[in-house]
Amino acid sequence: SRSSRMVSELSRTRLQDGYVSYAWERRMQEVLAVPNSSSFLSILLLPKASDRVASRYNDLEDTLARANAWLSASQVSGVPIVFMNIQTESLLTKISGETASATVNAGSLSDLSNLANASLYGFEDYHGVDIGVVRAVRLWYSPLVEEVAIEIKLKEDDTKLGFAISRTEEGFIYISSVIDDDENVPSTRSGLSTLYKESVSASRLLVVSRLSNQKVLPWMVSSTGAIRCFDTVSLSQKLSLHRHASIPILMHVFSWDQSLVSRGSSSARNWDPSPLVLPLPQEVRLAHQPNDNQVLPLPPGEPNESITTSEQPDRRLQRDTAGALGR
């Protein structure tokens, strides 16, 4: 019957899929807060080598603990960030000798349980080459609110920028001091000095996340435990070159207060393109509330030991040698 034929045809019909073109370049220019650059922030931690020749690595739990310590220490020092996600990431490498014999031994499913907490395991490819898989950890984080753009306009008669930068032990660049007795320096005209003072009052660091749209955040921890991050001297030199060339500086900082977002967007309103305001998901905003698993910065009433000046050195934060960037 016709009905049975339709039922039979319905059971045989399969949904079709395929590829369609997409205007990636245009979309990346139009919809991203910073064109061609993501707002996703992360740091990759390689497992720590337990010997000098890097043939042995600490286990996965050690790498996870170091990621946890890095995040907590950053928050305690005043960096306004929150945890987003954490995942393992597999990196291939060639292994041989003692390392290969110790790791290429997962010959059955029962052996896989022994690799659950291993940072390095191996297998042999078709050519008899021992391939090692290093299990790194990627930690995803986010600003407490979001990134705020600040445009620092420069004049030909500017002799200094009016601020100095430093770096935390965890690799974050931040504004460490400003000139507050001169209304005509770029840092005051742009509102950066005001933001800095508010950050001190809130027991936060005014962290610089981008310079000329380029991320200047720490992004990797090596197998020796060293953090790969940006050098304050080279950053200071680039900022000074902006002043000498009278080219405006576009700087992004981490916001810790929603009210700063509209202010920052307003200060950069003449910059093309202007940053978009992208609110965090509800679950991230809820994570800002105190709980047993979150390390919060010191309250404003307690002394802030995270901000340093040239007269008050601190062992956790490294003072930049460029001073006020005007020399």
Image (cartoon, rainbow, N blue to C red):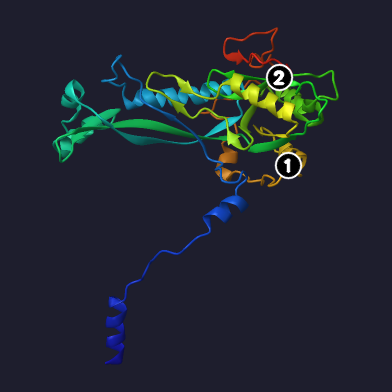
Where on the picture, by quarter, is residue 208? top right
The answer to whether residue 13 is above or below residue 98 is below
> Horizontally, is 184 left or right of 98 in the view?
right
Label annotation for residue 319: none
Give the alpha-carbon distance from disc 1 to disc 2, as whole Å: 25 Å
Disc 2 residue crowd, few under 14, some 14–19, many 20+, Cα 10 Å: many
* Residue 232: percent from left, percent from top: 60, 20
- Foreground residue, 153 or 220? 153
Asked if residue 118 shows in the view, the reply is no
Determine crowd level at label 1: few under 14, some 14-19, many 20+ residues with C-alpha closer than 10 A.
many
Query: Looking at the rendering, in which quadrant would you find the N terminus?
Result: bottom left
Which amino acid is tagged 2?
Leu
Q: Dot 2 lies on which element?
A: loop
Q: Quadrant of residue 199?
A: top right
Viewed as shown, does residue 266 lie left or right of 291? right
Q: Position of residue 80 (x, y in %)?
A: 61, 29
User: Quick one: quadrant of the C terminus?
Assistant: top right
Residue topped by disc 1: 265
Q: Amino acid at mark 1?
A: Ser
Q: Which residue is mark 2?
A: 325
Residue in the foreground of this view, choosing between 322 and 14: 322
